[in-house]
């Protein structure tokens, strides 16, 4: 399977502060990766580094064999990196349909396909961004990223603050997107059990260092390890 992306001994942070410490990982085309870890360990910083928004002090980033370490952010978006920020950034004064259309780029994802994935967005097509519920905004944020037709979708806590029924709806949509459409993704989440059920591979971070790396299914079945790494109780 072809390598899509790799971090090779990457140290990165903000100003003088080193957040990621010699981090290495790789992801193959069409695969999904969970980034787990407690608050403040560097999960968002990892995504920001991938998008070119942090200072890289050591190591390199590879995208389809090219060294992209010094590429500006817009260049990376153009190369196929699709980003859904932790703060949902939908345009409040545009309708759902306009929010989606305004970022559209050529490729398999279009309005119709996004509406098939999120029927709720179709029902809200004429509503303005600021008239949506939190869950609808989150679906719109994911839909907008898809409209840019990325090769890799980066999701930063897509489930944050959502009602359980919406969480399940969104999780199912993300699963379908990856398994049926072969879209690669990196999912940062606070809910390890759910996230592991949506991904192929997982890494666990602790203070900017990878402390576990392996198949999501195996980690999901190892209650003792999950408890030790993340303090998760396996009640759910
Ligand atoms: N823009 C910034 N400037 C300086 N330091 C930052 C900045 N953003 C994050 N940090 C610091 O980097 C460290 C990692 O933060 P990061 O947001 O990557 O963690 P996280 O794992 O995403 O946390 P959470 O689960 O709370 O979202 C923290 O110590 C944080 O204070
Ligand atoms: Mg974060």
Image (tube, rainbow, N blue to C red):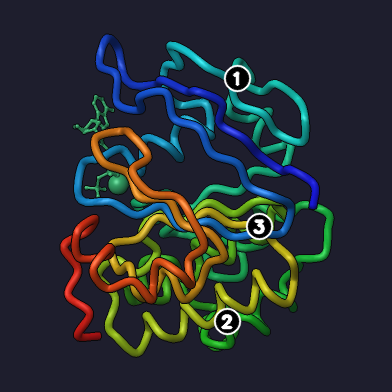
| Label located before the other in sequence (1 or 3) | 1
**Residue under numbered circle 2:** 118
Residue 108 higher or lower than 175, as above or below: above
Dot label at residue 175: none
Q: So how many labels did they put on this image?
A: 3
Which residue is pictured at 37% across the width and 84% down the height?
Answer: 166
Q: Secondary structure at mark 2?
A: loop
At a point 76% along the width and 66% down the height, the residue shown is 109
- Residue 156 screen position, x and y as percent: 40, 53
Classed neighbour count for the residue bearing mark 2: other residues with Cα under 10 Å, few (<14), some (14–19), many (≥20):
some
- Of the numbered discs in the image, which one, if any, rests on residue 69? 1
Q: Circle 1: is it few (<14), some (14-19), or many (20+) Cα within 10 Å?
A: many
Q: Is mark 2 within 8 Å of ligand 2?
A: no
Ligand 2 within 8 angstroms of badge 3 C-beta: no
Q: Residue at x 56, y 26 (%)?
A: 8
N-term-proximal mark, 1 vs 2: 1
Q: Residue 90 sits in which quadrant?
A: bottom left
Q: Which mark is residue 184?
A: 3
Residue 189 visible from this viewpoint: yes
Of residues 183 and 31, the one drawn nearer to the viewer in this rendering: 31
- Residue 20 vs residue 111, the one in the foreground: 20
N-term mark: 2 or 3: 2
Q: Are marks 1 and 3 in contact (CB under 8 Å)?
A: no
Question: Compared with residue 53, is residue 37 higher up or lower down, i.e. above or below?
Answer: below
Percent coordinates x, y for residue 203 in the rendering: 42, 51
Circle 3 residues within 10 Å: few <14, some 14–19, many ≥20: many
* Residue shown at 26% from the left, 41% from the top: 206
- Nearer to the camera, 32 or 121: 32
Foreground disc of the pair 1, 2: 1
Instruction: State the CA–CA distance, disc 2 to disc 3.
Output: 19 Å
């Amino acid at each position: 399977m072809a390598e899509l992306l790799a971090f090779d001994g990457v140290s990165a942070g903000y100003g003088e502060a080193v957040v990621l410490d010699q981090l290495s990982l790789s992801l193959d085309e069409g695969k999904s990766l969970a980034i787990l870890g407690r608050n403040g360990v560097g999960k968002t910083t990892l995504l920001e580094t991938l998008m070119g928004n942090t200072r890289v002090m050591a190591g390199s980033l590879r995208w389809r064999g090219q060294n992209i370490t010094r590429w500006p952010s817009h260049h990376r978006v153009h190369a196929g990196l699709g980003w859904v920020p932790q703060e949902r950034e939908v345009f409040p004064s545009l309708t759902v349909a306009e929010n989606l259309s305004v970022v559209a780029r050529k490729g398999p994802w279009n309005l119709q396909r996004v509406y098939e994935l999120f029927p709720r967005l179709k029902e809200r097509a004429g509503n303005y961004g600021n008239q949506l519920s939190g869950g609808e905004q989150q679906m719109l944020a994911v839909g907008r990223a898809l409209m840019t037709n990325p090769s890799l979708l980066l999701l930063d806590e897509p489930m944050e603050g959502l009602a359980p029924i919406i969480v399940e709806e969104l999780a199912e949509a993300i699963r379908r997107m990856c398994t049926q459409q072969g879209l690669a993704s990196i999912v940062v989440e606070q809910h390890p059990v759910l996230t592991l059920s949506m991904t192929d591979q997982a890494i666990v971070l602790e203070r900017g260092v990878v402390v576990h790396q392996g198949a999501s299914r195996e980690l999901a079945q190892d209650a003792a390890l999950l408890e030790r790494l993340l303090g998760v109780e396996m009640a759910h």
